[in-house]
Image (cartoon, rainbow, N blue to C red):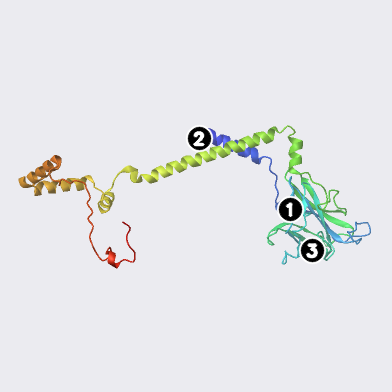
Amino acid sequence: MKRILLILFSAVLAAGFSDMRAQNVSDLIISEVMAEPDSSCILDDYGRQAGWIEIFNKSQGTVNYGGCFLSDDRSNLKKSPITKSDNRTKIGPRQVALFYASGDSHDGTFYVNFQIKRGSTIYLVSNDGRTIVDSIAVPATLPAGKSVVKSAHDLRQMEFETEAEPAAPSPATVNGTHETETGAQKMAREDEHGFILSIVSVSVVFCALIILWWLFSLLGKVSGSSSKPNGGKETAAGKVNAKASGKLTPEVAAAISLALDQEMNGEVYAAISTALHLYNEESVHDQESFVITIRRKESGWNNKEQNFRQLPR
């Protein structure tokens, strides 16, 4: 029975977690870097030409990278922090975000406070400020108007190699302005009749009941074993404690009986018999009339001469 329950519980857990998507900053990579733009390159939001950094989400879930860092200095990984207060710092599955290297992060959320130089290395750092999530080296011989790109040569394992290509951000660059599909919308699309939701709900309730039953059973066993220490067997220490607490144990009763038998003689037995006879015949009690008589006693408290008023007659 326990094996069947374990198999059912494992199956429900596997079904519940099978559709979970990775949502960690470790799923982000620096997919493309532009160091020195030319007249053919894109302009930033202020109409300026600046280098840029493209971050790609290789997972199937939305990743929030707010609080992470971008840097071109290995000794200063917190050089350009990414704000946490902007809701646009989220990348949907297979989407990219574009950061402009204008040298001033006050220009906006998607601007860094350094400019990209040839021969430098760009780092994407986790929100702890120490863990390097990804990095990309910019060749010193990279021509103007060219970007260094990480191209996937194994889509199943998401392995990338770096090469130089004409600079152009990926078409999926959205910087959080796109409308992503919510979980409820995705569930409504994939489970139109609600069968999956019903099965998952019933499975969760069933597993919760099994866990509660197991916990209460375990609690009952623990309580029962704690109420009967040593399996109900009385030890020598228990006997001593019983004597100290005033409980009459068989050993104490036997000792008392032996002492009484040695001390008692014929006169004691006769006295006990006489007392029992008188008690049963009710001849040891006085005969009372059960009438209470109250007699008036004169004192200074009830003397009429010493009172301020006359008692009514």
**What secondary structure is marked by label 3?**
loop
- Name the mark nearer the viewer: 3 or 2: 2
Q: Is residue 46 left or right of residue 64?
A: right
Residue at point 23% right, 46% down? 249
Lower position in the chain sequence, tag 3 or tag 2: 2
Tag 2 residue: 2
Tag 1 residue: 64
Question: Where is 310 relative to 222, above or below?
Answer: below
In the image, what residue type sits under mark 1? Asn
Tell me the CA gap for discs 1 and 3. 26 Å
Residue at point 10% right, 42% down? 273
Tag 3 residue: 120
In the image, what residue type sits under mark 2? Lys
In front of the other: 71 or 274: 274
- Name the mark nearer the viewer: 1 or 3: 1
Count neighbours of disc 2 (C-alpha within 10 A) and say few if under 14, some if 14 to 19, many if 20 or more.
few
